[in-house]
Image (cartoon, rainbow, N blue to C red):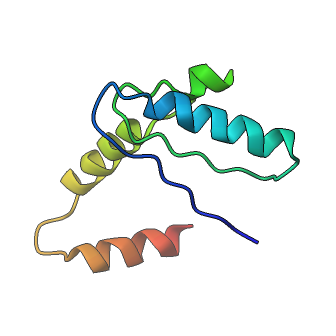
Amino acid sequence: MAKTIAVAGKGGTGKTTVAALIISVLLEEGQTPVLAVDADPDSNLGFLLGVDVEKTLGDLREDLLDEMKKLPAGMTKADYINAGLHQI
């Protein structure tokens, strides 16, 4: 059964540490797979978990913004997305 756990609060309150501890406990109990999303621009969760992070949400956001700049004049976003799906 899937679970969604969110950790939120003000800056500097230990959200990343709490998230890392929760993830560690879930993994120790064999509750896998675990998908962890660190939306913090500093992205320290991977470091705390000992995981090499290849791409952050910030990186993906920048990639998306770069792609949106390539949108041909007069083409809607929906048409652009459909054209991209046909390329896959």
Q: Is residue 81 left or right of residue 49?
A: left
Query: Foreground: 37 or 81?
Result: 37
Q: Quadrant of the C terminus?
A: bottom right
Q: Is residue 36 left or right of residue 77?
A: right
Q: Quadrant of residue 81?
A: bottom left
Query: Foreground: 20 or 70?
Result: 20
Whether residue 38 can be seen here = yes
Q: Quadrant of the N terminus?
A: bottom right
Judged from this view, the residue extending furthest toward the right is 30
Percent position (x, y) of residue 7? Answer: 46, 46
Q: Is residue 56 left or right of residue 77?
A: right
Q: Is residue 80 above or below residue 42?
A: below
How many marks the image carries: the answer is 0
Q: Is residue 75 above or below residue 37?
A: below
Q: Is residue 54 left or right of residue 41?
A: right
Query: Foreground: 79 or 57?
Result: 57
Q: Quadrant of residue 4?
A: bottom right
Q: Residue at x 33, y 45 (%)?
A: 61
Percent position (x, y) of residue 78? Answer: 29, 79
Q: Residue at x 64, y 50 (%)?
A: 35
Q: Residue at x 81, y 52 (%)?
A: 32
